[in-house]
Amino acid sequence: MKLLVIEDELQLQDSIRISLEKEKFVVDVASDYHSALQKIYAFEYDCIILDILLPFGSGLDILQVLKKEEKPGNIIIISAKDSLDDKITGLEFGADDYMTKPFHNAELNARVKAVMRRKSLDGKNTVSIANVLLDYDERTVTVDQALIDINRKEFDTLSYLVLNKNRLVTHVALAEHVWGDHVEDADNFDFIYSQIKNLRKKLKDCNAGVRIRSVYGVGYKMVEI
């Protein structure tokens, strides 16, 4: 899962990033209004953690941009202003939650998981397709109730394909989602091909009722068989 932290207080930004990465999220960061918009237009995020008071602009303006552009994602406002008006405005503009600084990173992590679960999984902590079950709390995959050996990147890759089942997922979208911004520096997508090859073998070996289909030169589709 890919997250964006928009926070100008660099020490707090770094603390949030490290805490979320320990929870196995891919995390991008932005420190001001303009760099935040650049990231938002360039990438798709599963969750955005957004400060209201930013250099060169307001987090509330970013919320309006997200709404206008119909950008998907879950949004949690973090602000030093414990203002009812700001909370109401933020929620009306499309935010899913509001936290007042200071807060514990553990609470933020829990809020992130909660809003993502509410939207992506309809409040559940698992998702299934055919005889395959993904557990997002335990980060495990079972086929016919038998646990299969899967690493973190493989879980994130499989999860993204499952949540977009029967849809075309491009190489670029998958790489950005699982590996983050530094994918721009990659010369090719060999690392994705290797990941998909491993996943296909593991799913086939345990008789999973799904298949990762290649769309030549473009990407992949997760389909039931």
Image (cartoon, rainbow, N blue to C red):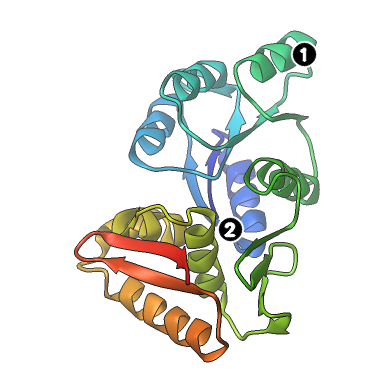
Residue 161: horizontal and vertical position, in percent?
47, 61
Q: Is residue 140 left or right of residue 61?
A: right
Residue type for callout 1: Ser
In the rendered image, which residue does mark 1 sit on? 83
Around disc 2, counting alpha carbons within 10 Å, would you say few (fewer than 14), some (14 to 19), or many (20 or more)? Answer: many
Query: Is 22 located above or below residue 84 in the figure?
Result: below
| Earlier residue among tags 2 and 1 | 2
Q: Is residue 204 left or right of residue 170?
A: right
State which quarter of the image contains the N terminus.
Answer: bottom right
208 or 116, which is in the foreground?
208
Tell me which corner region of the image, top left, top right, bottom left or bottom right, holds residue 85. Answer: top right
Q: Residue at x 61, y 64 (%)?
A: 24
Query: Is 166 located above or below residue 213 in the figure?
Result: above
Could you tell me which secondary element the residue under label 2 belongs to?
A: loop
Could you tell me which secondary element the residue under label 1 belongs to?
A: loop
Residue 46: horizontal and vertical position, in percent?
54, 45
Q: Is residue 29 left or right of residue 101?
A: left
Asked if disc 2 and disc 1 are in contact, CB closer than 8 Å, the reply is: no
26 or 103, which is in the foreground?
26
Tell me which corner region of the image, top left, top right, bottom left or bottom right, holds residue 207. Answer: bottom right
In the rendered image, which residue does mark 2 sit on? 25
Query: Is 192 located above or below residue 89 in the figure?
Result: below
Q: Residue at x 56, y 17 (%)?
A: 60
- Between the residue at mark 2 and the residue at mark 1, the CA separation in whole angstroms equals 30 Å
Residue 70: horizontal and vertical position, in percent?
45, 26
Residue type for callout 2: Phe
221 or 130, which is in the foreground?
130
88 or 195, which is in the foreground?
195
Outermost residue toward the top in this view: 85
